[in-house]
Amino acid sequence: MDAHGPLSEHGLVRLLDHHGERLEDQTFSPYAAHLSAQDLRSFWHDMSVLRAWDMEAMSLQRQGELGLWVQSYGQEAAQIGSGHALRDPDFVFPSYREHGVAMKRGVDLPSILRVFRGLEHGSWVPSEHGFHLYTLVIGAHALHATGYAMGMDRDGLVASGNPEQDGAVVCYFGDGATSQGDIAESMTFASVNNAPIVFFCQNNQFAISESVTRQSKVPLADRAKGFGMPSVRVDGNDVIASHAVSQWALEHARSGKGPVFIEALTYRMGAHTTSDDPTRYREKASEEYWADRDPISRLTTHLESIGELPDDFREEVAAEGKALGVRTREAVRSWAKPAAREMFDHVYAQPHSTVEAERAWFDRYQNSFADAEVQA
Amino acid sequence: MPVFEQFKMPDAGEGLTEADIVTWRVAVGDTVEINQPLVEIETAKSIVELPCPFDGVVTQLLAVEGDTVEVGVPIIEIDVDPTGEPAPAPDAVPDASSETANQEPANQVLAADATVQSAHHSQSATQASADAPQASAQQQEGESGAVLVGYGVKAGSAQRRPRKEDALDPIGGEGEASDYPVKAKPPVRKLARDLGIDITTITPSGPGGIVTRDDVEQQSKARSAKSLATYPGDDQPWLESGTVSPNGRTTRVPVKSVRKRTAEAMVDSAFTAPHVTEFLTVDVTETMKLVARLKQDKDFADVRVTPLLLVIKALLLAVRRHPEVNASWDDASQEIIYKHYVNLGIAASTPRGLMVPNIKDAHRLPLHALAVALQDLTSEARAGRIQPGSMADGTITITNVGALGIDTGTPILNPGEAAILAFGAIRQQPWVHDGEIQIRWVTMLALSFDHRLVDGELGARLLSDVGRVMNDPSQGLVWA
Amino acid sequence: MSEKVTMTMAGAINAGLRAAMERDPKVLLMGEDIGALGGVFRVTDGLHADFGDSRVVDTPLAESGIVGTAIGLGMRGYRSVVEIQFDGFIFPAFNQITTQLAKMHYRSKGHITLPLVIRVPFAGGIGAIEHHSESPEALFAHTPGLRIFTPATPQDAYDGIQQAIASPDPVMFFEPKARYWDKGEVDTGAVTSRLSERDATADIGRARVAREGTDVTVVAYGPTVRVALQSAELAAQSGTSVEVIDLRSISPLDTAAVVKSAKKTGRVVVAHEAVTTFGVGAEVSARVNEQAFFHLHAPVLRVGGFHTPYPGATSEHEYLPNLDRILDAVDRVMTH
């Protein structure tokens, strides 16, 4: 790997290596100093449950219960680590793979599958969780995130003098997204408006089949400099470092110092989605290299080495994961298909004559069949 | 009691329609759990492992390695309650899955599309195909066509969903009572226009108050037949119009416009020019054959070809041989004006009355051009759109009494002209042809002429010439 | 309080923006050069001086960014009125407008409303260079989730901009730049009673009958209403009574108003600057066909831009629907 290219591991912030050893970093160790063994077990729990659930969702797709699934497999540390740094006043704009952050924001994981079962395009209320809906147009949400952050600033939620009240926006996107014009425009607007936003790029190294080396000649975080924004590159498979840099970044933004760019180098262990076939473009060797750097196993090794991963705890977590899987499966199979006429709802906030006329026609049409059920 | 579940081939990749079975990871009799690897399949996009959706015991593999299976077709059967007693037949057990919407036995679902392409048909699949007709009538929305979630998009059921009576939404939005001008389809409007009928005067009988084609045609007939009414002094219906006398026994209608002009012209002509009429009966079989041939001729595909067309041509040929009939008696200057052109008039009954438009310079027109001119003239007449200019300066006229089924007549000259030809109905009659009685097409021609400038002999020669061409159209070639 | 003032259309929009900003502190203006310069057409003239940097924002030169950040602000309840400097430059924002702005309410099942207004000086007839005379409204009308409004008069501009801002739905406000300097009387008090979310939205969905007539209906909107009225005047002199409908709202399209007129006259001509093929005229024609077929004496005719990119200014008056072309269509439907 080219020392200066986008896959470079040179200079990554790392506080836990893949052998399970703790490391020191001059700038960021202070932001992890507060983490107790309990906290680390909490990370381990969240990552393990997330992965178990993600695997269940994968099975459900292969069993025909979902049209599509987008795995977070391999990216647990970046998502759980950063998710743990979020506070109530913060607001998150995810792309569509951040199920771990959704979990930290209180979104009930099974409900995410409603989108992938084709029932609707968004299955939680953003304002109730501080977590926007998934945006499938790559990079488009970064502008929304920036605008939202500008709004938070206008509303006095940034550098208010009361740090408990301050909030910031975290905008997640992948390596491919950094090529989109909207990302550049977001960073333009964020920087000139000093917006309280953390741009969190999970560089999982692939945009479907295209390596990040096709998206950039230089490490992705280097772009931030061009916008006058501080940036950090972190080992995205290290949950402790991911958490630490996120803490730092959020404090920076919440305190009115403006936008920040985090690049978390990780690896997309699964395929892009269930429609993808990585065997066509990925080397087994690279998959094996990154499997060795798995985010959960290094923490397992570390906790075991300090005697902080008791068997009963592991069994509890495994049972919880399994139970979540069962509950998810039952939920998915129980969801009723919405009545077709619901497709006319919510196109507009106020009545629109075309929609009203079409809905009325559709009702009459549906009613014209001999086997029509009487609609309430 | 055993409960059999089937796992249908899923769409693993957003719109795939089939997959190949590569390797079974389980065998009949194996105990399996949810998410355990079941089988490796190959799709158009990739090789994929399918995890088991049930806990239980494998009772049947419904496809073998190497089979291509369509999405939605069952590939394995698993008994999810294996501790129960064995069931009598594998296809008679109701589906006890948690999906409350699923009414019919699992093996009938999507059976209509079962196309397992293998020599090893499973019993269930065959049974399922046989049950397909019943299944389709009960197909719920999930199975009747575009099934999303993991089972891809199939071509929908080949049967229409039955409608209620009066199911159709009327075209034209909500039917509001309209006090706007009449409703009619464009072709009907055109028909009314062509027939010279004001569509707003027609009472509509179509659904929603639309004027129909029938309505227009009825009105057109009624026009020709005249509207009748009954009057108090007489219980028989009479013409409706004008001023009815108090006792109801007479109606006075003022003489106006076309009627007035026609009367004046007839008087002028009949009581100025001494009229003589000569008659000729002609075997026109050859003309009829020529008409039939021309109708098939691609050069005449764009026009109507009728016997009248050939009469016109015959008369024009005859006039060329006897140009003295193409003239006018000018009493004021005591001169006969011979015309060097033929403006051939055709007497036409129009919605407004009798009119005689003429084909200008008909003597110059080849047959096809004559056909076009005749057609234009006819349609203008029907639409009531004859311009005064077309009626001016006629030199000779044909009146087609045959169109009304009449044998012949004694026509009155069009004022300013010296001859008028009446062309009668063409009928099949017994005739002597080649020395034998045969059935031939026969008609009568009658020529009235102004005896001040046309003698009987001239008239006779003219009429005779017309007859000769009609009897033998090749005579036209000789005289051309 | 009702007051009648003579204003240009640009001035009417300016006054409407001012009134809306005074009424609601969450109304923001954003766009390129709208601050100190007052906008390239001076539509926002004087507003920066009175409302300051935080409410009248000169943005970076990035249309997608302007609309996208306005969406984010909208999620925090800000009613952004975004200016796209010229019609031809809306395309970098097309993605944000169609995949995000239009769909957000639907995607969120009503939990997110985005009460944005996107102001777009549009259409031609001003002798401009390439990309400054476009009529892209059909592209947006074809997108469910957006409302499209275009005023033809200063009164409608004054009322319409305020109602668009009051509407909870995203509204694209197409301002006919050729009409910016037209003067008209504006009753400045009339709109204030119709600014509830429901009333405002309902109002910006209606067409108006600009001139009554009985023989032919001419449907137009925006810059074309003026020449439609001129055509009607000339037609009247030769005995043809033309009814002119100013659509005002492209989405929703006031079908009831158009169909009512079509049933009355039986002959319809639609005129717009936008390219005829696949344009608003085609939609009007289809609806008239479906709902007034049996009343029609002639097919619906459309007069609009040809299927070419907008030509050089020297040819634009032949390209655009002018008096002769509209009257040609009127003559043609009148032969039936």
Image (spheres, coloured by chain):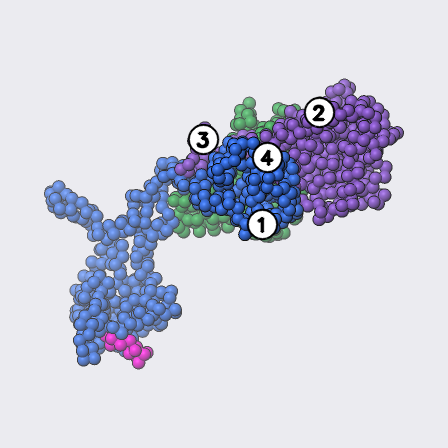
Spatial CA distance of label 3 from label 1 is 42 Å
Q: Which chain shows up in purple? A: A
Q: Are marks 4 and 2 on the same chain?
A: no
Q: Mark 1 — residue?
A: B68
Residue shown at 18% from the left, 45% from the top? B229
Task: Give percent across and percent down for residue B461.
Answer: 22, 77
Q: Mark 3 — residue?
A: A375
The prevailing secondary structure element of the residues shown in magenta is helix
Q: Tag 2, which secondary structure?
A: helix
Q: Mark 2 — residue?
A: A316
Task: Give percent across and percent down for residue B338.
Answer: 28, 73
Instruction: Assess whether residue C77 is covered by the magenta stretch.
Output: no
Amino acid tagged 1 = Thr
Would you say residue B311 is visible in this rendering? Answer: yes
Task: Give percent across and percent down for residue A178.
Answer: 74, 40
Instruction: Assess whether residue B473 is covered by the magenta stretch.
Output: yes
